[in-house]
Amino acid sequence: MNIFFIDLFISIDTLSPIAYLLNEKKINSKICNLNPIQDHKKNKIIQFLIKKNKAIYENFDSLSILSSIKLSIIKIILTLPKRIICRTERFWLNIYQKSSFYSEHDFEMYLIKNKARTVTIEESLLRKNRIMIYNVCRKLNIKLIKVPSGLTFAIQKKINNKFIKNQYLNENLSELDYFISPNNIRGYRKKIKNSKKFHIIGSARYNSKWLDILDKIYKKKFNKNKSNLNLGFFLKKTSEFGEYDNTVKLVENLKERKNFNIKIRNKPRDALPFKCSSYYDDELNSVQLINWADIIIVSRQTSILIEAVKKKKIIFFLNFLNKNFNIVHLKNYKYFFNIKSEKNLLKLFNKARKKKIKINLKSRNKILQDYCNNKKYTDVQIEKKFVNFYLKIQNEKN
């Protein structure tokens, strides 16, 4: 059995496509949720996977009576009205980040019960759980695999008036057996890249086959007003450079003009109960927003832009709201439109309305080559590489 431990949506988004590829080839895999606050069983991706295999998803349970009681109390609290449970974010963040619900014994018994051959985690999994999983995997001689969040966007650093890729100096391969990267964009240290633990395969999440599946899962009919442009904004509330507040102000200004259809999508990475999460009440999710929009607009880079690139969407970078766009790697590609002012933005909107904006297809191909490993492999070959990778690990002698 191949176990995929998840907690937040980002881990579902990252690991589900891999679990799907394995199950499709009759390679037993299971997704196990470690989040005591969020039960993902109603998530549409998880529901899709369950239809294919009823046993593919479950919530992790503690063998401790005390922990089981605490988990039961949390479930009861979560049934209360939103106005009650959302009064304080700190309470829920403390539960998620600091409270202890599981032990190494719990993980050991679970992996033995499921006859686990591999365990895969996404890199943002809470450290307290990562350490326990690592210790148990060592004890049971189970291979531990880590997958990075998203597509590991590189940030550049200016040295001697030249931009170079930052090295991810904190990357540590000591507490795992394998690290699967979709690309080499992050700028890993030479020591990391030369390690036998390090493997560049490609992206399962942004593979064409999985994107087609997501389109079916989130299929939605849109009533488009052809006289207005559909503008899709991706936002993240934990703004690092003040870009969130500035973007919200811009959105409000554009809404007053009455000639735009505007929808926003908040980044789905909250550790809060679903009722309190900023993205939970969004009209459209990320896949739907991209399909609906004529133009995708961001004030910071995000992996979801690669899906928009694959679907040949026009993408605007709001440089004038976030000066740090000058040091992000995506800015190097001519596919994206770098917006220098609100006046410049409105001018481009007019051009788009008249169908006078064209995307750079050559640059698009380069982005997909660099970020999805499509320079070396086709999407079909990447699917096979994931399957073969796990088959090979399963057959390794400890």
Image (cartoon, grey):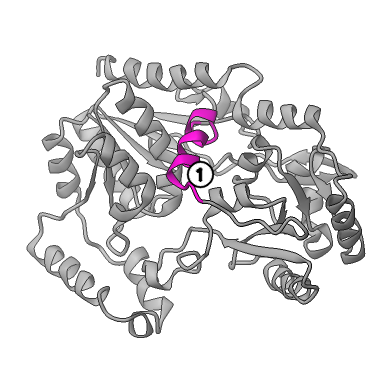
Image quadrant in which you'd find residue 23: top left
Q: Percent from the top left, x then y, of residue 330?
A: 74, 42
Q: Secondary structure at mark 1?
A: loop
- Horizontal side of 95 relative to 326 (left or right) equals left
Q: Is residue 333 magenta?
A: no
Residue extent of the magenta highlight: 204-220
Q: Percent from the top left, x then y, of residue 228?
A: 76, 60
| Vertical order, 385 against 2 (above or below) | above
Question: 187 or 302: nearer the eye?
Answer: 302
Indicate the amino acid at tag 1.
Ser
Question: 370 or 63: nearer the eye?
Answer: 370
| Residue drawn at point x = 66 percent, y = 20 percent | 375
Report the number of numbered marks: 1
Q: Percent from the top left, x then y, of residue 369?
A: 67, 25
Write down the residue under mark 1: 149
Q: Is residue 211 magenta?
A: yes
Q: Percent from the top left, x then y, of residue 198?
A: 49, 26
| Residue drawn at point x = 23 percent, y = 71 percent | 74
Image quadrant in which you'd find residue 170: top right
Count neighbours of disc 1 (C-alpha within 10 A) and say few if under 14, some if 14 to 19, many if 20 or more.
Answer: many
- Horizontal side of 153 relative to 180 (left or right) equals right
